Image (cartoon, grey):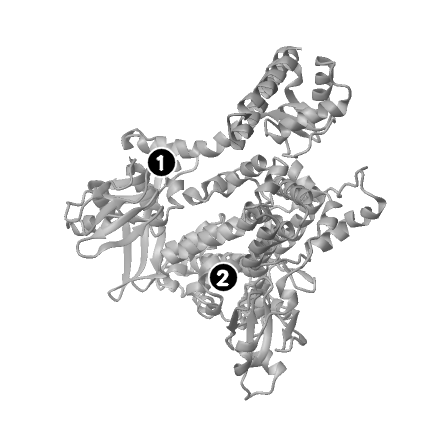
Amino acid sequence: HQLSSHTRTIRDSSPCKAKHSTHTSDVCDITHGFCNAARVVHSALIVRSPGLIRDRKHHLKTYRQCCSGKELVDWLMKLNECFQSRSQAVGMWQVLVDEGIIVHVKQELNFHDKDTQFYHDELQEGLSLLLQIGPDALLTMILRKCPSQRSAEDLEVIYEELLHVKAAAHLSTSVRKELAAVLMFESHAKAGTVLFSQGDKGTSWYIIWKGSVNVITHGKGLVTTLHEGEDFGQLALVNDAPRAATIILREDNCHFLRVDKQDFIRILKDVEANTMRLEEHGKAVLVLEKAESTNPGGAGNSSKYTVMAGTPEKILEHLLETVKLDTNDPCVSDFLLTHRVFMPSSQLCPCTYHAEPSEGSDLEKAAYALNTKQKIVKLICQWVAVFGQLLKDDPIAVDFLERLGEEVAGDSRLSSMLREQLRDRRRTRYGTIYKTQDNHIFDCTGPLMLNFISHVSVFSLLVLYEIFRPDHTSITLMLPVNTSVQEMMSSLVNPGGDHVLVKMNSMGDRAQLKLDATAVHTSLGLNERLFLCTASQVEQLTPLKEQQGPDQSTIDTLEQMCSKDIASQLTNYDWELFTAMHEVELVYYIFGRHKFPGATTANLERFVHRFNEVQYWVVTEVCLCADLMKRAMLLKKFIKMAAMLKEQKNLNSFFAVMFGLSNSAVQRLYKTWEVRPTKRVYCAYERLMDPSRNHRAYRLAVAKLSPPYIPFMPLLLKDMTFIHEGNKNYTEKLVNFEKMRMIAKTVKIVRGCRSTPYGKTKGLADRMFLEAPSIRVSTYSEQSLPLRNPSNIRHYVQNFEVIDNQRKLTQLSRGMER
């Protein structure tokens, strides 16, 4: 009775306030009432039945401090005789689920009166938020410490932050570690604050951690604006000169990372002192940097020299000299992943042969020669493991491997070592699958390919090209995926004409393709098509009707499919696309595919294309659904789908769905969002999309994941572009190997994600990939069951029709809600 009276009092007081307040305050009062009522219910639950809130086990997984849906309904029915049915009690709990006051452990939006459905209170949501913002507060706290008081753990936290700061992208690992020890935190509250003025003495170097500043000089005024991650003030310290500009805060609450002059100069001197330069004929050929490494077993620290820069030949020579036969040196895999950037196969293969030493006994010379050959065999084993079947398209590599194979076969010591390498490779290998448009799958890692039986090229696999004429009639051709525009034109028209190949999107934007462009099929954007015409017809080309996207929503189909089943099929398809991508495609994509003869990024481009497709599918479905209630249901379904995708560790499609929901054409549908209180659940997931601190929220979430998982590919590509653009390939005509190391480290993230096949994991999230989609007893008609068949759902998710014209989507949105 106390619970009922309190709830009634809240309800009775609301109309009195409504006479004197706006609609917004009414909503706030009602929400406040919900919260008060929920706290009373929660307090009563703890006092009267504390045993209901406990750890639960279901399907081998433990859910901490929660209640089952059935027990909550039972408890409420016993507590208050006013409830005439269980459905009435379910309705009350549903109110609290809608308001986010109690939350389903899997983020489901419907309350279930079942023993196997678990709920926890708002404390969990609060803890979730604090877990996301806590690391930021921890880093600020560490930076506010005096440098002498920072622990080794503190320094590691700062170092990890610097890995994602633009201003530190070009710095070596050792310099970042030294900076971590001396960086200071500095903040200013008000916009317009002058940090320093032109002509002042230079005392510090600054990195913008939060906010932005204006750079102003005498006579020119505002020169530029600097944002988060950028730096200023370094020039005056290096040259020991006055400040060349005035720095003024552009916004309130700006935070900076500051390095004072004495520390800055000391770090520069330390770098020089720890750097070793090897010269030949008066020119530097190798630059090494001394790094401290901890010996196994805690036997103290030892110095190790790492390659910073060098000629390709000297870098390879150094690796062969320092590599150990019984361990795998990450520096070797860094070299192999990136060698095509600075050392093609035609240069790499000859360099693996070394002259024997001119001094020493015959026995010593023989031992040296054997040791060198063993290192070469190990290096080549790793090379083949990285590139696999890609090497079949490289005649120089094929010839080299055949000759090396003959040499190994003639030496029992080398052949036994090779067999051991193969056994290790089979135990630890991960599959790299190439999948073509016509669904042929090839496992490309296979045993070590020292002798090739056939020379079938991965890139000779055929795909269907559909090319349109100006009158919208089409020609279809089956051509290799890596076909050039020149080769396509030769198949279509006689040489010597003025025909051109043009790609055009749904908005009518045209781009003429260059004759040497390759793999055009997979580089087409959403709803882009190829057109063949004369040069004079280019401006008259118009988009096809199919390029405009669908006219009707598939809401009737979606209503009959379970969100979990759709999410599972999305993940299955994404995993196929993700594993089809060879890791070196990332290197080709970032440095420019045209720089690598015969290379393709077709699989990577298909995967990126898929992200855009899923994103616009969400927007298209919402903007084509004219019925308000169905549209609200659709929002709820997509949010639930996002929850499932996150649970399945498919972060790529999770972000695609969330980006779709955050599209301006969807966000402006205020009436739709208000029909069902889904905004709060959406906002909880939206926090993962926060781009501040270089997507810190996402990176922290990913750091907790174990493989397998599908990463957010656009951000991974952004990281690699960030490294590429912030660092030169060559420094003083030497290969910038520190840059190659950073690129390889990012590529290895993809390797790690795919290191475990989904079938061998035991976690609940992983089993969700393998469980057959459930057919539940429901209100669906029998006619709807075929639509819920896994093969039908799979066909649906692989054949989305989308509108990618943002202007059209906005018009549709405005047509539904002015």
- Between 522 and 728, which is closer to the camera in this rendering? 522
Q: What is the C-alpha distance between the residues marked 1 and 2?
A: 34 Å
**SS of the residue at dot 1?**
helix
In which quadrant of the rendered image does the N terminus lie?
top right
Q: Residue at x 30, y 37 (%)?
A: 181
Disc nearest the viewer among 1 and 2: 2
At label 1, counting other C-alpha atoms closer than 10 Å, the crowd grade (few under 14, some 14-19, many 20 or more) is many
Query: Which of the numbered marks, if any, corresponds to residue 749?
Result: none
Q: Which mark is residue 589?
A: 2
At x 52% / y 74%, what residue is drawn? 513
Report whether 339 appears left or right of 8.
Answer: left
Amino acid type of the residue tagged 2 in the rendering = Tyr
Decide: few, some or many residues near mark 2? Use Cα within 10 Å; few <14, some 14-19, many ≥20.
many
The quadrant in which residue 444 appears is: bottom right
Q: Is residue 422 visible?
A: no
Q: Does the image show residue 592?
A: yes
Q: Residue furthest front?
A: 19
- Name the N-terminal-most of marks 1 and 2: 1
Residue type indicated by callout 1: Leu
In the depicted structure, whether residue 445 falls above or below residue 777: below
Q: Nearer the viewer, residue 813 or 800?
A: 813
User: In the rendering, at what x and y percent does residue 736 appear?
Assistant: 36, 58
Residue 145, x across and y down, in percent: 31, 30
Q: Is residue 340 left or right of residue 460?
A: left
Q: Position of residue 450 (x, y in %)?
A: 58, 64
How far across and down, in percent of the image, does residue 557 sit?
74, 50
Which residue matches tag 1? 155
Marks 1 and 2 close (CB-CB < 8 Å) = no
Q: Secondary structure at mark 2?
A: helix
